Image: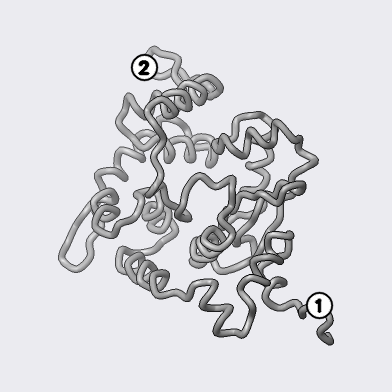
Amino acid sequence: MNCGVYRIIHTDTGRCYVGSSVTLRARLKHHRVMLRAGKHGNPHLQHAWNKYGEEKFQFKVELHCAPDMVLFYEQLLIDNLKPEFNVLPTAGSMLGHRHSEEVRKTMGRAQRGWRKKYDWKGQSLCLADIAEMEGVDHQLLISRVLGAGMPLERAVSLDRREMKKTYGHNGQNLTIKEWAAVLGMHPRRITYWLDSGMTIAQCIERLNRQAKAMSFSEFCKLSGFNLQTAKSRMQKGMSVMDAITAPARGMAV
């Protein structure tokens, strides 16, 4: 199984970044490539990488799970470990985080500086500039062109169609952005779910299931595990499953 939750750990201090993916190997490889190139999207993690060096970081898969549970388990670790390198409080969402105008402009200039230029309508532009010109989602455009290798013209036209496409449920026919607003989700998150073959009804069911899911502290209490012991073990590098199943010191195996 290639789906699950991972951590990028600074081994000297224990500070970490928590993430999840349905393609773990590719995701971790992407992190390494971007960090080595000095172009990682997380400035805190990139700064620490530049300061301490690659040899001081460990890439660790914490657990494997079903694709529809990766965000749930990622959120559990974020809530309980409070990872220092994560800039967002919610797994798979930009809700609750907003960069200052100055930071956004600086990030935009930096991203435009290293991104590849494309000939588009007589100009040499990066994908972010093309997305802005055409009024399409730049993250989806970047993912389709750089991630999936899709021709630029097709990626732009496809994104235009997706933005206008409506999805029906319970008598309502709304676009992705409209459904995202109704459900309190980020548009990229619901887009990912719909692209994976889910319907709006299944998205709603999944949201309800995650809302009712047991927290890590509740799980520890119900299972008879000591919450602080489990947290301490994970902070020392132990996986989630090992942290809650390994016998305590001095206990017979």
For residue 167, above or below residue 249: above
Other residues around mark 2 within 10 Å, as few (<14) / some (14–19) / many (≥20): few
Measured along the vertical axis of the image, is residue 246 above or below residue 224? above
From this viewpoint, which residue is outermost toward the bottom? Answer: 252
Residue at 38 percent of width and 52 percent of height: 191
Query: Mark 2 or 1 closer to N-term?
Result: 2
Q: Point out the frontmost of discs 2 and 1.
A: 1
Few, some or many C-alpha atoms within 10 Å of disc 1 (few <14, some 14-19, many ≥20)? few
- In the figure, 222 relative to 112: above or below? below
Q: Quadrant of the N terminus?
A: bottom right
- Check the image and report above or below for 47 versus 76: above
Residue 166 percent location from the top left of the image: 24, 52
Q: Residue furthest left?
A: 171
- Can the viewer see residue 154 in this picture? no
Q: Quadrant of residue 74?
A: bottom right
**Which residue matches tag 2?**
121
Label 2 close to label 1 by CB (< 8 Å): no
In percent of the image, x 50 and y 44: which residue is there?
87
Pick the quarter of the image with the C terminus: bottom right
Residue 128 location (% of width, % of height) = 42, 28
Q: Secondary structure at mark 2?
A: loop
The disc labelled 2 sits on which kind of residue?
Lys
Please name the colour scheme applied to the rendered image: one colour
Q: Amino acid at mark 1?
A: Arg
According to the picture, the residue beneath numbered tag 1 turns out to be 249
The answer to whether 47 appears left or right of 194 in the picture is right
